[in-house]
Image: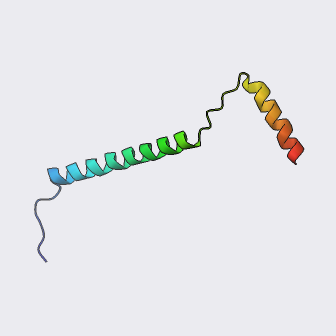
């Protein structure tokens, strides 16, 4: 077997850094896609009243 005596080079650091940021960017793009595709755009005037109505509907379904 032939072993390299160079060790950790600048190319290794570039690849490691690129891989790290590539994963971070891929996860951010994936999360942004899921967030934008799952948001209904529904906006209510009073969130407290809306939550109470949701609780009543949930209790009625039980």
Measured from the top left, where is residue 37 in percent x and y? 54, 43
Q: How is the image coloured?
A: rainbow
Residue appearing at x 71%, y 22% in the figure:
45
Measured from the top left, where is residue 26 in percent x and y? 39, 48
Q: Nearer the viewer, residue 2 or 42?
A: 42
The image shows a total of numbered marks equal to 0
Q: Nearer the viewer, residue 13 or 61?
A: 61
Residue 49 location, quadrant: top right
Residue appearing at x 32%, y 45% in the figure:
21
Q: Relative to 44, is 31 on the left or the right?
A: left
Residue 55 location, quadrant: top right
Measured from the top left, where is residue 52 in percent x and y? 81, 31
- Rendered position, 49 above or below 23: above
Residue 43 location, quadrant: top right
Measured from the top left, where is residue 39 in percent x and y? 59, 38
Q: Quadrant of the N terminus?
A: bottom left
Q: Relative to 32, is 38 on the left or the right?
A: right
- Rendered position, 5 above or below 12: below
- Rendered position, 5 above or below 21: below
Residue appearing at x 62%, y 37% in the figure:
40
Q: Residue furthest bottom?
A: 1
Residue appearing at x 15%, y 50% in the figure:
10
Q: Residue furthest top?
A: 45
């Amino acid at each position: 077997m032939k072993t390299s005596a160079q060790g950790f080079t600048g190319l290794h650091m570039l690849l490691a850094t690129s891989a790290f940021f590539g994963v971070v960017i891929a996860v951010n793009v994936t999360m942004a896609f899921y967030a934008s595709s799952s948001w209904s755009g529904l906006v209510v005037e009073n969130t407290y009243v809306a939550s109470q109505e949701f609780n009543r509907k949930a209790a009625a379904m039980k």
